[in-house]
DNA sequence: TATTGTTATACTCTATAACTATA
DNA sequence: TATAGTTATAGAGTATAACAATA
């Protein structure tokens, strides 16, 4: 097992060090992100469609407006996204029983299955490359993955 | 100073562990990448324009065809990118002295300055969030940044 | 009258196909 | 004849504006 150990020096970093880290981390994340996106381009869903499906899978049924806000697109754009996903059988629309204006959207069983398949395919590409790394690097990434998620949600 | 130290256990990881890492790393990278892209949306350049300018800044003058290949777009698309960047004064075109068909593209001084400003702005956003992390997390990210770049180029 | 979602329309980015200029 | 780049045209994705239905 590899672990992070402190050797006992000051816990604050210089502004310069932080700046350098910001730059290199941004480059690394953007570059790997671009590759992952390119690899996932044959799965038949646009990035927004895929993100919407993932949000529905994670957060359960949401109104069209809530989805638009979550994905940071305008309502008319989300309408088109949902129309496409519905035509593909991946989501279903139903009227909100308490408010007739609201269109509740939920992922279908097929939608969840498709999402799983897409994720497995993307993971496979990355796994292949991870397997080629030395164990120290893998351990670094394991710890970084969790920090990156927290950073993105901050 | 924080350092990674091996405690001496097996250097191979189970396929399951690798799979889990692949998933969480993909999610973390994609999510942070999306945030970084959204933050950089007010800098007036499209992602491809920015990437092209960065490539020119890094690799020196390149032909339009070489740029198209580097950014993985078709030549007509790169023509439009260069037309836009040239109109903005960020790149310059010149004829190749040895082959009249080739259009050599290079970043102007203004282009390099604009690139620097954009990078500083994006870094600033990330820096603000990095500064809020505990030092252990920062050290993890410092080591991960380099590994991520290698992974993307693999 | 305010709000949710849709339709109409336009703009941006990228692609393929056809064309021009040079080798 | 082959290659580098451009112009012409089309398609995908998103936006704003105008509209319909419900609260």
Image: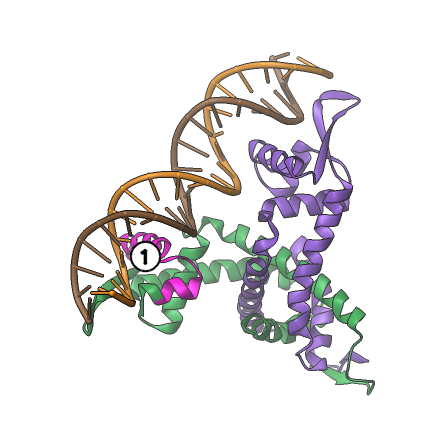
Chain colours: A green, B purple, C orange, D brown
Residue B128 at x, y = what percent? 66, 72
Residue B28's quadrant in the figure?
bottom right
Q: Is residue B64 above or below residue A52?
A: above
- Crowd rating for badge 1 (residues with CA inside 10 Å; few <14, some 14–19, many 20+): many
In the picture provided, is A122 more to the left or to the right than D16?
Answer: right
Q: In the image, what residue occupies the spot 31% across and 70% down?
A: A61
Residue appearing at x 67%, y 60% in the figure: B121
Give, as a single range, the part of the protein colored magenta: A66-89
Asked if residue A9 can be seen in this view, the reply is yes
Residue in the foreground of this view, choosing between A89 and A76: A76
- The residue identified by callout 1 is A82
Residue A67 lies in magenta, yes or no?
Answer: yes
Which corner quadrant holds the C terminus of chain A? bottom right
Q: Is residue C18 left or right of residue B70?
A: left
| Residue B110 horizontal/vertical position (percent) | 74, 43
Pinpoint the chain carrying mark 1: A
- For numbered disc 1, what is the local secondary structure? helix
The residue under the point 60% across, 41% down is B72
Residue at the spot 70% in from the left edge and 27% down from the top edge? B103
A71 shown above or below B64: below
Asked whether residue A26 appears in the rendered view, the answer is no
Q: Nearer the viewer, residue B134 or B93?
A: B93
- Residue A88 position in % (x across, y down): 30, 53
């Amino acid at each position: 097992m590899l672990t992070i150990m402190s050797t006992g020096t000051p816990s604050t970093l210089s502004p310069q060090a932080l700046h350098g880290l910001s730059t290199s981390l941004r480059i690394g994340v953007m570059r790997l992100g671009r590759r992952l996106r390119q690899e996932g381009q044959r799965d038949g869903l646009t990035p927004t469609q895929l993100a919407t499906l993932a949000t529905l899978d994670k957060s359960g049924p949401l109104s069209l407006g809530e989805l638009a806000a979550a994905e940071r697109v305008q309502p008319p754009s989300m309408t088109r996204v949902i129309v496409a996903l519905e035509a593909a059988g991946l989501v279903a629309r139903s009227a909100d029983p308490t408010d007739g204006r609201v269109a509740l959207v939920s992922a279908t069983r097929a939608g969840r299955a498709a999402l799983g398949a897409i994720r497995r395919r993307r993971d496979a590409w990355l796994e292949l490359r991870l397997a080629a790394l030395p164990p120290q690097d893998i351990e670094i990434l394991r710890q970084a993955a969790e920090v990156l998620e927290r950073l993105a949600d901050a």
